Amino acid sequence: MERVAYALEIAYCGSPFAGWQRQAGRATVQETLAAALEGLGIEAALAAAGRTDAGVHARRQVVSFRIRLALDLEAALGSLRGALPRAIRPLRIARAGPSFHARASATAREYRYRIIVGPGPSPRAAWRLPDPRSIPALPPSGRLDLEPMRAFLAEQLGRRDRAPFSTGPHGPHVTELLEADVRERARPGGSGYELRFVATGFTRHLVRHWTFAAAARGAGQPLDLSALATERGWRGPRAPGRGLVLWNVRYPDDPFEPSRG
């Protein structure tokens, strides 16, 4: 029997994990998912649409694998739900086209970053400001100024080398930022903000560096981007992983769309 391609859609809270990628001696989403699948008799290499970092969450992560087995999709999904910890939630499973690959087939990914300001305990899925380690003060209004934040995001739109805002190996990191915006949401005792990014690809820590730069501008904090974003990569603070969510992944032929039959 030839190998059959499957796509699995999951959501997860990243707090208990050291990221997606398997790491020796540390709990990761990839290793936890692989162990659950193996318990169901499914042994396969897993490819993920986004290799999220430690503490980063996912509303829609897509994972692909190939096996020489025709799965009962409904039964497999139910068994997987019982095998995984509460932090990982399998949403859907589908048979995919023979060339489908969760990462390589994606045309764009959407990430969202959540910020809250004001008193109270720090939530698991947002960055609370002010942050004494990076943005220690806010404007007298106690709110971020959206106009300079939006101006910064508009400057990043388009196709270009993202190496200055990236962390990792040297060399070109060309991606196209298709959409970027920020909106404010009222919350008890303060304000909440959500930054949204849609791009053809994201280099390591790119969204967290962009978020820090945008938040710093919104807080009226002097920021010399030419000193922080150099040819050798970002050299400044970044927003913490807990506020970041892999929100969506776009495919030209989405295996979960009803039109596939």
Image (tube, rainbow, N blue to C red):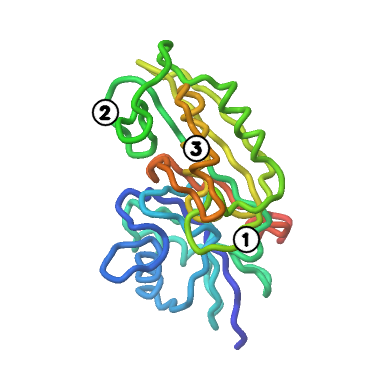
- Pointers 1 and 2 in contact (CB under 8 A)? no
The furthest residue to the front: 227
On residue 121, the disc is: 2
> In the rendering, which numbered label is found on residue 156?
none
Label 2 neighbour load within 10 Å: few <14, some 14-19, many 20+: few
User: Is residue 76 left or right of 249 when viewed as pictured?
Assistant: left
The kind of residue on which mark 3 rests is Thr
N-terminal-most mark, 3 or 1: 1
Q: Tell me: 234 left or right of 159.
A: left
Amino acid under label 2?
Answer: Pro
Query: Residue at point 54% right, 49% down?
Result: 230
Q: Secondary structure at mark 2?
A: loop
**Secondary element type, mark 1:** loop
Which of the two marks, 1 or 2, is nearer to us in this view? 1
Residue 170 vs residue 58, the one in the foreground? 170
Q: CA distance from mark 1 to mark 2?
A: 40 Å
Closer to the chain start, of discs 1 and 2, is: 2
Closer-to-camera residue (43/188):
188
Amino acid at the residue labelled 1: Pro
Residue at (46, 67) in percent of width and height: 76
Residue 49 x/y as whole percent:
55, 60
Q: Which mark is residue 211?
A: 3
